[in-house]
Amino acid sequence: MLEIKNLVAEIDGKRILNGLDLTVQDGEVAAIMGPNGSGKSTLSYVIAGKEDYEVLEGEVLLDGENILEMAPDERAAAGLFLAFQYPLEIPGVATMTFLKSALNAQRKARGEEELSTPDFMRRVYGAADKLEIEREMLKRALNVGFSGGEKKRMEILQMALLEPRFCVLDETDSGLDIDALRIVAEGVNALRDPKRSFLVITHYQRLLNHIVPDTVHVMSQGRIVRSGGKELALELEASGYAEYRSAEAA
Ligand code: ADP
Ligand code: MG
Ligand code: MG
């Protein structure tokens, strides 16, 4: 369902992705691991359509459509969801209001009717309760003053509400204590579905004890250099990334 072919991308004239190929099937949870600076976050930004990243070659096909030709909001309507290492803070916008406009924008782009307020509230509270998010938090400005764990839970809440086809989680584990990690992992696991796929990007193996991937891919110098099953993550944890470090860092 997601096919990345020969992706070459740069930022500020520096080439970061060097012909990356990756296929993720329907229902699959694929993990990308790799040393710092190998281009993992760049891959997620390029998939998201963040400005400043220039794609020189290749395509990213979601259900056969090249999302690189879509605006970021069209990508979201097509079913893409991205959770970032450093979530956006939006002062002055209550989390509830943000969630409602995100959900309704997506429904509109899909030609669906806006949700009524009671319907919306029911969905938000149902999802928030599962993630142990206090209702009080939903009234506060999005992410402003939230702890690392609260921000991550909020992202999983957004994911649960938007019901995406394809989710990218970039370093969702960084800065999480063990309880927050468990809640996030349970939230993701609850959303696993034969029609939904995940790309879980992480430097550490720890998260993959909780979100057990179907496939593991090692990224180095802007390419996937090795692929395997979940046991590959354990092997990397034991051996480290020494053999995958960039020539530059060596
Ligand atoms: P990872 O997420 O795997 O740690 P990143 O995608 O964040 O890697 O970074 C990949 C490489 O791109 C790094 O060498 C980083 O220094 C470089 N890089 C990131 N942003 C810029 C930028 N704005 N200009 C030049 N190089 C950048
Ligand atoms: Mg990094
Ligand atoms: Mg990164």
Image: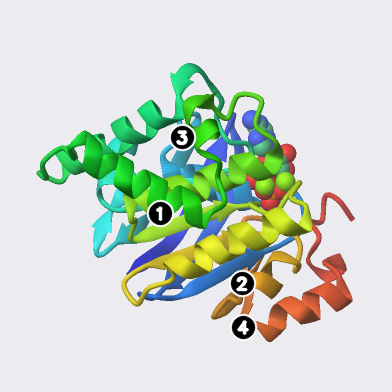
- From the image, tell me which residue sits under label 4: 228
Q: Give the percent coordinates (x, y) of residue 18.
A: 57, 55
Q: Amino acid at mark 3?
A: Lys
State the residue in front, 174 or 154.
154
Mark 4 vs mark 3, CA separation in Å: 29 Å
- From the image, tell me which residue sits under label 2: 217
Q: Quadrant of the C terminus?
A: bottom right
Tag in front: 3 or 1: 1
Q: Residues within 10 Å of mark 1 (few under 14, many from 20)?
A: some
Please state if 222 lies on the left or on the right of 138 as rendered. Answer: right
Q: Are marks 4 and 3 in contact (CB under 8 Å)?
A: no
Q: Amino acid at mark 2?
A: His
Q: Amino acid at mark 4?
A: Gly
Residue 104, quarter of the rendered image: top left
Q: Give the percent coordinates (x, y) of residue 169.
A: 55, 54
Tag in front: 1 or 2: 1
Identity of the residue drawn at 60% across and 71% down: 211
Q: Amino acid at mark 1?
A: Ala
- From the image, tell me which residue sits under label 1: 160
